[in-house]
Image: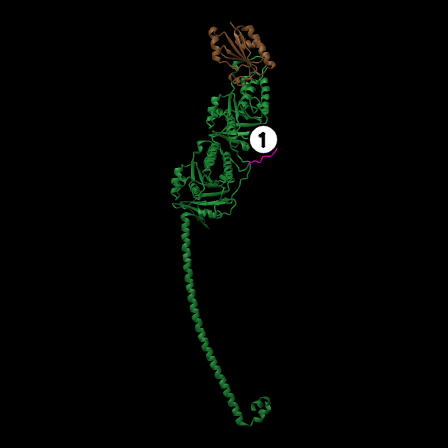
Amino acid sequence: MKARPPLNNNGSKPAPPAARLPRCLTGILGLDEITGGGLPRGRPTLVCGGAGCGKTLFAAEFLVRGAVQFGEPGVFMSFEETDAELTSNVASLGFDLAGLVRRKKIVLDHVYLERSEIQETGEYDLEGLFVRLNHAIDSIGARRVVLDTIEALFAGLPNEAILRAELRRLFRWLKDRGVTAVITAERGREQLTRHGLEEYVSDCVILLDHRVHDQIATRHLRVVKYRGALHGTNEFPFLIGDEGLSVLPITSLGLNHKVSNERISTGIPRLDAMLGGQGFFRGSSILLTGTPGTGKTSVAAFFAQAAARRGDRVLFFSFEESPNQIIRNMRSIGLRLEPLVQRGRLRFHAARPTLCGLEMHLATMFREIAAFRPAVVIVDPITSLLTAGTDFETKGMVTRLIDFLKGGQVTSLFTSLTHGGHALQQSEIAMSSLMDSWLLLQDFEGNGERNRVLYVLKARGMAHSNQVREFLISNRGIDLVDAYIGPSGVLTGASRVAQAAREKAEALAGQQDATRRKRELERKRAALEQQIAGLRTEYETEALDLRRADEQAGTRMRVLTAERTELARLRQADAHRAAVHAPNHSQPRSR
Amino acid sequence: MKTRTVKRPKSGSPRRPAGAAAAAPARRRPAKLWQLRLYVAGQTPRSLTAFSNLNRICENHLKGRYDIEVIDLLEQPHLSQGDQILAIPTLVRKLPQPMRKIIGDLSDTQRVLIGLDLRPAR
């Protein structure tokens, strides 16, 4: 049996307080996390449940893992199944009991009790059982003991009073021996066990349950009691898989996974631009919802291709299409996934959703993820799994899946099919709150055609575009173009192209008009300038005339004055009067 | 006929092969030899009571045709598995077939006789 890689569900290890009870790791996937480190060491634990709950397997796994992984040999005392039956039963889980028995790691002891062969005469005790158990423990130095199902003694021994007293002594004795014991018991009608064993085993009680809901059976585990320790008290689904039990905590114990600031491309440059220019955060969870045929798988495939080309490993869970079909279909839009598959960068895992219950799907996914260790996980579509469980369960499963992936810094992209109509966004609310980014692909119907558009509804922790983009898929890939948003609404497809053409025509016309006006203006300016030049010429002519007239007038004045002076001098008679009347004027003139 | 009442708590070969033990006497007196085995755990008062009760009953009802083997599980714990011993003391009737088990200190003689098929159950 190979050792299972330890599951680190949420990247956190509960810090062990100094004073707490010593624990005994079970090695059962998930159980050690719920119980905070395993069962109480050196004490008996009661595992009860109805028929077919997996009690015996629980006990067997506890013992086998103890022997194989933790170096603690164990004794399996079976009151129901023979050694051979037990060995073959647990062989289906990959446990080699016979080999462990040969290597003296495990002792199998089948206690057979047939009431009809037994006659009771007087007092007795169960010292024989003690001797037997003691001998088995000593023979291999066992640290773990399983008693499966000790209640069979109630059917085999007539005196219940003695039996009860002896059981009390037995559990006391087990504690004194310091072995960690698992005691299985049938579920009773009004109490935990049919014969009230919980009265004796009071340190730790685990209840297993197997319920059928909508024709799908799910096993649940609950830690009813764990004396002196904190533990998850919820019901946890668990599975019996190829490698034993796995308990799956519905909610991880904390929300404290590491976060990365690294951004990874979506594979579609324009989409990266919408997401703050760099794409998604590494380790974030992305929801991609859309109505049928909007290109969800294509977007997922582009993301996968980009990641694989970057060197990341990508695990693609397909619940609707076969891997070959995806590869073929993606080739039609210019994606070559085949070489990536061959190089081991991309792995497909396809399964029908109805193949098994939700928990089984989840366990399968966990196992695939643990084996392949991808950096990117794509689930296409997550809604298919809704058919395998109720909404509540699906949400629980997605939560656990996301927790698990985030714990490992794995980027996850979930596509989700919504059915057309008004409730497009409401239907996903249950799931969307778990997602860091949410892209919505939608059909726009109008003018006799359908066109795809894409919105970024949310993208935690990054600036993102709030605009709608038209989403075009061609044989060269995916392209995002701005949708035309105008007074008549959002136009896409042919309408957008027509609108663009119209706008172009309008723009051209406008341009031509402007040119024409410019020319007109130019012409006007030329005319004006011409006019101005004419006016100026006219003005200059007039100014010249004026100046000339001025000059002529001045000349005439001077001539007149000179003539008058001459005349006065010639007359002389008035010279004196002239001197009296204007002494100041005439005098300097006379001088 | 030879009567053997053996108490062998420290026997080197604790359990004789059942076939051999049964075969030899069976040839002489088929279904007549009673082979009984008493399992105890230490010399407790209860086991001593059981042993003396067994001796008394055998002497009274099976005189001359019984063989008692006492096995102390504290000394030979591995023998508890073979006869599926849980209760102490346990008396096992190995022969005649079928095997019968009687648990307790054998103080109720009537029930011991019923258990050993020496007296039909009322």
Residue B22 position, x and y percent, is 48, 10
What residue lies at 41% left-to-right and 49% top-to-bottom? A495
- As displayed, is residue A555 above or below residue A510? below
- Describe the element under mark 1 as helix, strand or loop: loop
> In the depicted view, which residue is nearer to us: A145 or A495?
A145
Quadrant occupied by the C terminus of chain A? bottom right
Residue A173 position, x and y percent, is 59, 22
What residue lies at 44% left-to-right and 72% top-to-bottom? A533
* Residue B2 appears in the rendering: yes
Picture colour for chain B: brown
Q: Quadrant of residue A519?
A: bottom left
What residue lies at 58% left-to-right and 91% top-to-bottom? A579
The disc labelled 1 sits on which kind of residue? Pro
Q: Dot 1, crowdedness within 10 Å: few (<14), some or many (≥20)? A: some
Residue A146 position, x and y percent, is 53, 24
What residue lies at 50% left-to-right and 25% top-to-bottom? A104
- Which residue was labeled with disc 1? A22
Q: Quadrant of residue A477?
A: top left
Mark 1 — on which chain does it sit? Answer: A
Residue B16 position, x and y percent, is 50, 13
Q: Main secondary structure of the magenta part?
A: loop
| Chain that the image shows in green | A
Q: Which residues are magenta?
A: A13-23
> In the depicted view, which residue is nearer to us: A285 or A514?
A285
